[in-house]
Every structure is written in structure tokens, then in C-alpha cells.
Image (spheres, rainbow, N blue to C red):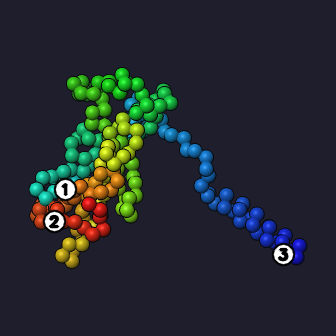
Amino acid sequence: MKKKLLTILTCLALSIAGMTTLGIKNSQPVEAKTGDKYGIVKPFVLPKSWRGNWYDATGAASKIWKSGYNKPENSIWVMGKVKGTNKYPWQMSKKWKNQKNPVASNKKLFTHYTRGTWKRMKGVKWAVVTWALNKKFTKKNSTAFACHYEKLNGKRHKVLFWANGKGKVVGQRFKDVNLAQKYGKYHFKDMSY
């Protein structure tokens, strides 16, 4: 009996030791990265398959590039703490937030700066974007987009979905103008509208 108990305890101890050495997640907090003087760590990179022109039901084009969308000033960034402080950009003073853009001095620095993160909603991986000075990504202040294949008339087509911050689709775009005009308002069964 003692031998069985000793064997069980030994196996239990070894399995626990094995789990800790195999890299089971530790509950210690992860230290946030520090960005530059504006809190920018690096560009938020979108997948290559998403890049290029996308068309909506009216035939209007939207462009996705490596780390942005629509206009060149709509760049998406990974944000961290502001260099020399222990604060994120949204925690900084009002004066700091209202500083002028060194490139376009007639605009505030953060007029077009957005920050992004990846989030899985309803089984789909979304790039969620909000203004750089928003503390949280919410339904009201965020835009999300995801790209995946859908079947239309027996053929697979790539569709770019635009949604609010909770994954409710508000628009969709296609690589082909004719396809976009035909199916731009179509509701796919696996998406929430």
C-alpha cells in the first residue's frame, strides 16, 4: 500500500515538474513595451492577402496596404508607453494630446493615428482598429475588418468584411467590381449583420 502511494505521489510530482518546464503559462504580468516619443512601437501589419483595392456595392474602391487603409494618413500602429514616461498616449495630458503634427502643422498630431489589435469574434479573426488616444476598443469607437473566403454560385471568392468593434458586419467588399455590385448587399449565413 505504501509502495503504491509513494509511486502515485512520485508520478504526480514528476508530471507537475514536467508541466512547469514545458512552458505552461505563468501568471506573472507581461511588461508593456515602450514606444517612441508618441508611444508608437511599430506598424500594425495586415496580411498580404488583404492588400490592394476592394470594391463595395456602389463600385467605390477602398485600399488596404501593409499597415493602413483608405488614405495614406490612416496608418495603423501598435502602441506602447510614451518614451520617458510610464504612460500610454491616452493617459497623457490634454496639452500633450493636442500637440501639432510636425509634418502637417495645421492638424493635431493624432488626427489620423489609429492603433490596432487582433481579436477573434464569432470564430473569425478580425483586425480591430480605434483612434490612437482611445483607452479601450469598444463597439462605438472601433472598426473591425476580416478577410476570408465565401461561396457564391458554387465558387469561392475572397470577401473583405467591415464591422463595428463587436463583429457586426456593416459592409463588405470584393476584389472584383462586378462581383461587388452583384453581392455587395448579400448577407452571408456565417456572418452577423
The reply to whether residue 66 is visible in this rendering is no
Mark-to-mark CA distance, 3 and 1 = 67 Å
The residue depicted at 16 percent of the width and 57 percent of the height is: 56
Instruction: Residue under label 3, please give it.
Output: 4
Rendered-image quadrant of the N terminus: bottom right
Mark-to-mark CA distance, 3 and 2 = 67 Å
Rendered-image quadrant of the C terminus: bottom left
The reply to whether residue 138 is visible in this rendering is yes
Q: Nearer the viewer, residue 45 or 94?
A: 94
The residue depicted at 30 percent of the width and 68 percent of the height is: 190
Q: Quadrant of residue 11?
A: bottom right
- Disc assigned to residue 76: none
The residue depicted at 32 percent of the width and 39 percent of the height is: 131
Instruction: Residue under label 2, please give it.
Output: 183
Instruction: Residue under label 1, please give it.
Output: 54
Q: Is residue 154 above or below residue 57?
A: below
Few, some or many C-alpha atoms within 10 Å of disc 3 (few <14, some 14-19, many ≥20)?
A: few
Cβ atoms at labels 3 and 1 below 8 Å apart: no
Look at discs 3 and 1 and give the one toward the viewer.
3
* Residue 148 location (% of width, % of height): 29, 64
Give left or right: position of 152 versus 96: left
* Residue 61 location (% of width, % of height): 15, 52
Q: Amino acid at mark 2?
A: Tyr
* Residue 93 location (% of width, % of height): 40, 25
Mark-to-mark CA distance, 1 and 2 = 13 Å
